[in-house]
Image: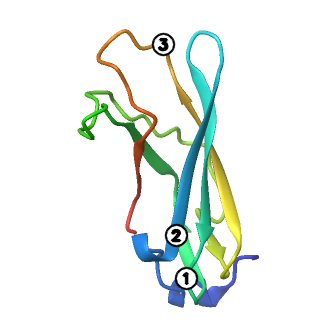
Amino acid sequence: MPASQGDDAVPLCGSDDLAVVVEWKHGSPGLDGQVIAENVGGRACRLAYKPEVTPLQPDGTPLPVATIVTLEEKLPPYVILAPGQRAAARVHWGAWCGQQASDRARVDWSGG
């Protein structure tokens, strides 16, 4: 949806509003992928800024990796998702030689 002056009135998306998937493919030397968020709620909601992705260990605890959010200027700095709509953001995980990652990750959005 295009940005408008009333967009601030659209509530931020919460965990109950979204189904989120992180898809990875092997790149060189790390992993490239995307975060896909789908609005599964009954109302429009706003995703602000970029997601932070933290890979999880097999026991569900976060891996001790740094999250770096790049600073490209995105105008507006959010997306509004109507029910059933999806949005995607590219992510990259560099080479990793530490503890084993599982097939799960935690995804957080600033303010939501």
Q: Mark 3 and mark 1: span between their CA atoms?
A: 36 Å
| Residue 70 on image: x %, y % | 52, 38
Kindly identify which residue carries mark 3.
95
Which residue of the protein is positioned furthest toward the front in this rendering?
A: 59
Tell me the residue that label 1 is attached to: 41
Q: Which residue is mark 2?
A: 18
Quadrant housing residue 44 = bottom right
Does 82 appear above or below 51?
Answer: below
Q: Where, by quadrant of the figure, is residue 82 drawn?
A: bottom right
Q: Which mark is residue 102?
A: none
100 relative position to 35: left or right: left
Residue 103 in the image: state x and y as whole percent.
46, 35
Residue pictured at 58% horizontal, 10% vertical: 29
Question: Do the numbered discs 3 and 1 sit on residues whose CB atoms are within 8 Å?
Answer: no
Helix, strand or loop for disc 1: loop
Q: Can you say which quadrant of the picture contains the C terminus?
A: bottom left
Give whichever of discs 2 and 3 has the lower sequence position: 2
How far across and down, in percent of the image, does residue 104 sit? 42, 41
Residue 69 to residue 109: above or below:
above
